[in-house]
Amino acid sequence: MKPEFIELTLGSYIISHGYNSKNKEMMEPIVSDTFSKKIIPISRIKSVSEKYILTDYVDGRWIYWEYQEDYKTIKKLLL
């Protein structure tokens, strides 16, 4: 049975507010000096790269989180 949630250590993030009239993504970076543990529903995860985990956010937005774990660890947790 696959878990429904994943615990990650997350830091700075970028909120995607959608696209402007020229089809350019509108991004709002939020810088954090520290990382903190968060539990995220796996159903919210859209993709994982070597630097960011992309998840759903409020009102149809997306959020790109920096994470402290390594990519291989997250991949194992999700698979």
Image: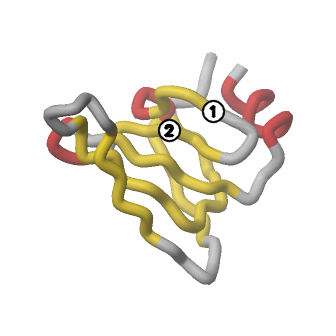
Q: Label 2, on which residue?
A: 54
Point out the image quarter for the N terminus. top right
| In this rendering, position of residue 66 left or right of residue 69 | left
Check contact, mark 2 vs mark 1: CB within 8 A.
yes
Image height of 27 relative to 22, above or below: below
Q: Amino acid at mark 1?
A: Val
- Residue drawn at point x = 48 percent, y = 32 percent: 45
Point out the image quarter for the C terminus. top right
| In this rendering, position of residue 18 left or right of residue 79 | left
How far across and down, in percent of the image, does residue 47 sit?
55, 28
How many numbered markers are drawn? 2
Q: CA distance from mark 2 to mark 1?
A: 6 Å
- Residue placed most toward the observer, 67 or 14: 14
- Residue drawn at point x = 22 percent, y = 47 percent: 58
- Residue drawn at point x = 49 percent, y = 60 percent: 13
- Residue placed most toward the observer, 5 or 69: 69
| Residue projecting furthest to the front | 22
How far across and down, in percent of the image, does residue 78 sit?
67, 27
| In this rendering, position of residue 1 left or right of residue 21 | right
Within-10-Å neighbours for mark 2: few <14, some 14–19, many 20+: many
How far across and down, in percent of the image, does residue 30 sit?
43, 69
Image height of 55 relative to 2, above or below: below
- Name the quadrant containing residue 35: bottom right
Image height of 69 relative to 2, above or below: below
Q: Label 1, on which residue?
A: 48
Q: Earlier in the sequence, mark 2 or mark 1?
A: 1
- Residue drawn at point x = 25 percent, y = 46 percent: 17
Image height of 32 relative to 4, above or below: below
- Name the quadrant containing residue 66: bottom right
